[in-house]
Amino acid sequence: MTAFRPQTHIRLARPVSDLAAAERFHTHGLGLTILYRGNATAPGEHDLVMVGIPGAAWHLELVGGPELSTTPSPTIEDLLVFYLDGPVEENLVDRLLAAGGTRTSSGPYWDRWGVTIADPDGYRYVLCTRSWNIAP
């Protein structure tokens, strides 16, 4: 028996080079809510902003600041896919671009099924027109 359930919360943490720019992309661009903010108060700690949708079983933790021990190093395969189950609204794309994103490609499959936007550090977000549906 596994300890994982559909409501098991998931945290995806990413280092960012500019925490303010990352926050702007995720809140003004994607429309996510700030769920928590923390500032480094001791050596070895880092500044962070947690963003997501209140009540969802996931959130993104954006970590940065002078104590950050690693730099962002996304690859073309580092995708965060949002299954929107419908067309990608052009105003969403416009907001993401205005918030520091760059429209890019993640290959023919994702180009066919959505829009890919890279955040200020180059992490790719796919706004997919498909729904998430896996048959048991």
Image (tube, grey):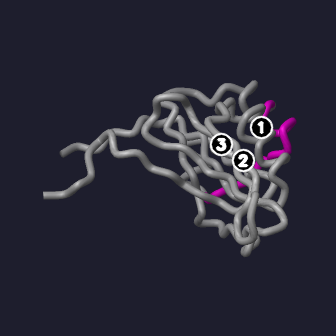
Residue ID at (61%, 47%): 126
Crowding near pointer 2: few (<14 within 10 Å), some, many (20+)? many
Crowding near pointer 1: few (<14 within 10 Å), some, many (20+)? many
- Badge 3 marks a residue whose secondary structure is strand
Q: Quadrant of residue 18?
A: bottom right
The reply to whether callout 2 and callout 1 are in contact (CB within 8 Å) is: yes
The reply to whether callout 3 and callout 2 are in contact (CB within 8 Å) is: yes
Residue 133 picture location, percent across and down: 33, 39
Q: Return the disc, 3 or 1, that comes first in the chain's sequence.
A: 1
Whether 89 is drawn above or below 1: the answer is: above
Q: Quadrant of residue 135?
A: top left
- Badge 2 marks a residue whose secondary structure is strand
Q: Which residue is mark 2?
A: 117
Q: Which residues are magenta?
A: 95-107
Residue 96: which disc? 1
Residue ID at (73%, 34%): 27
